[in-house]
Image (spheres, rainbow, N blue to C red):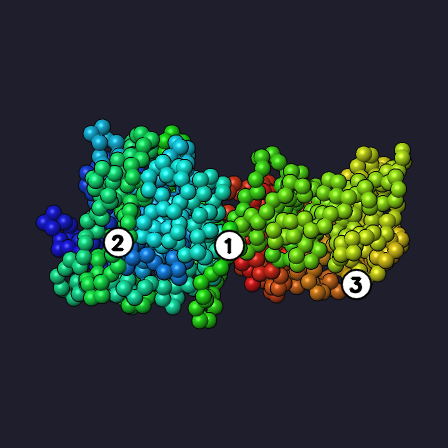
Amino acid sequence: MEPLQQDDPRRIGPYTALARFGESAVCVRYVAYGPDGAVSVVSVARPELAALTAFRTRFRSETRRTERLAGGWVAPIESRTDGDPLWTASPYVPALSLREAIALGGPLPERALRTLGAGLAETLSRVHAGGAVLHGLAPDTVLLAADGPRLTAFGALGAAAVAEARPDGQLTVRLGYLTPEQAAGSKPGPASDIFVLGLLLAYAATGTTPLGDADRIAHAEPELDGVPAELRPLVASCLAKLPEDRPSAGTVAAELALEGAAALARDGWLPPGLVQAVESQAAEVESLRSGGEPGQTGPGPTDAIPQQHPGGSQDPVGAPEGGQLVTGGDTLVVRGRGADRATAALGVPSARTAPVVPGAPAAAPALPAVPLPVPAPALPPASPPPPAGPDRRALLVGIAAGVAGVALGGAGVYALGDDASKSAPKPAPTPPRTRVAGVPPEPVWRYEHPGKEDDAPPNATVSGDRVLVLTGGDQAVGVDVRTGRRLWQLAEAASPSRAVPVDAELCFVDGESEFLWISVRDGRIKHRVAKTTLLGPGEALTVGSVTGWDGSTLWMTGHIKKGAATTAHFLAYDLVARTWQWRTQITKGQPPAIPRYDLIAVRAADIVVRQDAASLTPVQRRASKGASVLLTFDRKTGRQRQTLALPGIGPTAALTGDAAEKVFTASAGELHAYAGSGGKRLWRLAAAALAPGETGVFPFGKGVLRGSTLYVANRHQEVCAVDTATGRALWRRSTEAPVWGSVPATALSASGGTVLAGDGVQLTAFAGRDGRRLWKFQEAGASDVPGGPRYVPLQGGGRMLVVQRERTFYALPVD
């Protein structure tokens, strides 16, 4: 800190400046106090830059994005984005920049590395939720406070190493980092932030950059010998040359600290020397409040640490000569492809700096550039409480504003932003954090299944609450439910049918020519049975579809061909013994389709199915007279025991059955219950009340059962809890989503305490007991329209709810 200079303002909006707190390429920072006496850091834009229309536009844009991201490791800010001067203000928190921390104390220990990386990754997850890029990671934009790390730049201005006003009215901005895709002249994406995060973690772990220049960044393997062994694979994956090989921000956060950065930092995370430096800084600021004079406690924020270059020259870190950006209006363009060593090295020293000397004065923090001042709680206490931020991975935000874009190198770049693990020893148990009412849980990860835009979504099964198994026409993929990391992919296991869990270790896949038993942990094929060996001599099996499963028994439909004759069958297969239990011949179905059966109910002695309407033959349609026809098969022998028509229930109406021989279905907007034997109607639940101007039928969909309660949604966007014995509605609540042509998909959390309803706009959660609406979840930046792809909650996953939206999957922690 330094005394105010003659030209420094004494009043900045409602703030009274006390001392200079450093400066960056685009601003000068001041320690100041506001009307309430609380100390803040106020960043004032340099006048020569503020005179440019391009600068004011970017300043306003980046400031607004910061305001939208407030929470967690990003503090709320006040600002003036019109008039003169331009400024932002945020509560002061004692903290050191990452650069200063390494200069003072040398490389960080593993616990500190985990906390640092998890906090940054949690913030990146929020940014990347909209498919945007941060452009703000650098040693000077990362702060280390007593309660955790802070990320303080959310755009090109905040991370600028050099910013200059050109005579033609344009703004030149030079950034202090480079990625392989940028070195190749390609557009950076969210994965570019992950690469820079890997550079920062390696720098924090070793005191030097693992890749010293642009050529090494583009082609060489990083030098990671100094990174702790437990973290080395993760850092190496962040530094992968191909963006698609890098983990997501949510995955990085989960691998570093599954319980969250705030929990890991709760009992202290900084080495003693850094704690002393932070406390020294806090004491000096407190002295200013009491009328003391500012004193320089170490190298000032603008005293660059020199870096040795080939040829013996020394350049200040963060002042690259390449990677220059020129902005005019609202567009950024690259001037030149080259990157010097300072740029490529992320602006970090090339060798480790000396550790802090006990008793030596602490360095003042080099706080980041406009538009983001230091995000933190107000001054003292000395041990600030953990931020009210993400206690899990922050991958998506509930409902967020749109994302603005700028162009870099002639390609689009977003100025805002978007795998198993060991965590550090957990701190002592603390009271659980109460979730704010109405705020959705922060997703642990987001996984985008590869494929073309017009490809069909994959079939999804959660196996053993541990692995999400996705199957399709080209491959099968296993995704870790805990981290979102792709564990394996297997082209040999391509299948049009869903995978079937066998036990905690294996899943079953109906391959093209074989039945396969695959280890969900690593994707290895443990057993295989050729379909040519499954039946009798001369017989060949073609599986139509998997009907369902219970325990070790799998039911499916298929064609069996022998010579010129082809017959349709309903089959039961023991997945553990790997033998047939029975096969029963059925009607062949509408040619050339194999009949498809939907599983309605599993009972002790039998199972109930319904043939899919699309495969009904004309004879079957005439015989059913437009009604749903239920077929009952003996579980032991496969003998068909009953054919039951439900008059008034169409062949496509949603059906759900229980183990007590009841069937629940929709009819004319009502919900009906029928006896499974005989088809007698037991009760009916009235249709949804129409709002003024509404017309049409609002049928119920397929429900989910928990004990004697049925949870079911209708097209009116209502979710109901119904007593299956009496038909009494225990509660009925609206998702408040627009009414449209499809019924929300419903599911239950593993405990049964939360009811989920997913439609094309949102995923809504209700308390199972009383129907209280808990929260609504949407992916920020997604095109959420009533007729769009639905959020489909999947059963299984334990305390992790997996949600599918066509080819995109999320994991939400629920009760």
Give the x, y percent position of residue 86.
24, 45
How far separated are the C-alphas under marks 2 and 3? Answer: 73 Å
Q: Residue at x 36, y 43 (%)?
A: 211
Quarter of the N terminus within the rendering:
bottom left
Visible residue check, residue 406: no
Q: Nearer the viewer, residue 412 or 740?
A: 412
**Residue that appears at 84% across and 57% down:** 635
Q: CA distance from mark 1 to mark 3?
A: 38 Å
Disc 1 is placed on an element classified as loop
Query: Mark 3: which amino acid?
Result: Ala
Q: Nearer the viewer, residue 92 or 97?
A: 97
Number of marks present in the image shown: 3
Q: Visible in this render: residue 807?
A: yes
Task: Return the x and y of residue 135 as percentages of the image width and height.
Answer: 36, 43
Residue annotated with mark 3: 660
Q: Is residue 106 rendered to the left or right of residue 248?
A: left
Of all residues, the one furthest to the top in this rendering is 168
Query: Residue 612: which disc?
Result: none
Tell me the residue that label 2 is attached to. 353
Residue 616, above or below 263? above
Q: Amino acid at mark 1?
A: Val
User: Mark 3 and mark 2 in contact (Cβ < 8 Å)?
Assistant: no
Asked whether, in this view, residue 5 is left or right of residue 218, the answer is left
> What residue is disc 1 on?
444
The amino acid type of the residue labelled 2 equals Thr
10 Å crowding of disc 3: few (<14), some (14-19), many (20+): some
- Residue displayed at 36% across by 60% down: 109
Mark 2 and mark 3 lie on one chain; the one further toward the N terminus is 2
From the image, state whether disc 2 or disc 1 is nearer to you.
2
The answer to which of marks 1 and 3 sits earlier in the sequence is 1
Rate crowding at label 1 as few (under 14), some (14 to 19) or many (20 or more) other CA atoms within 10 Å. many
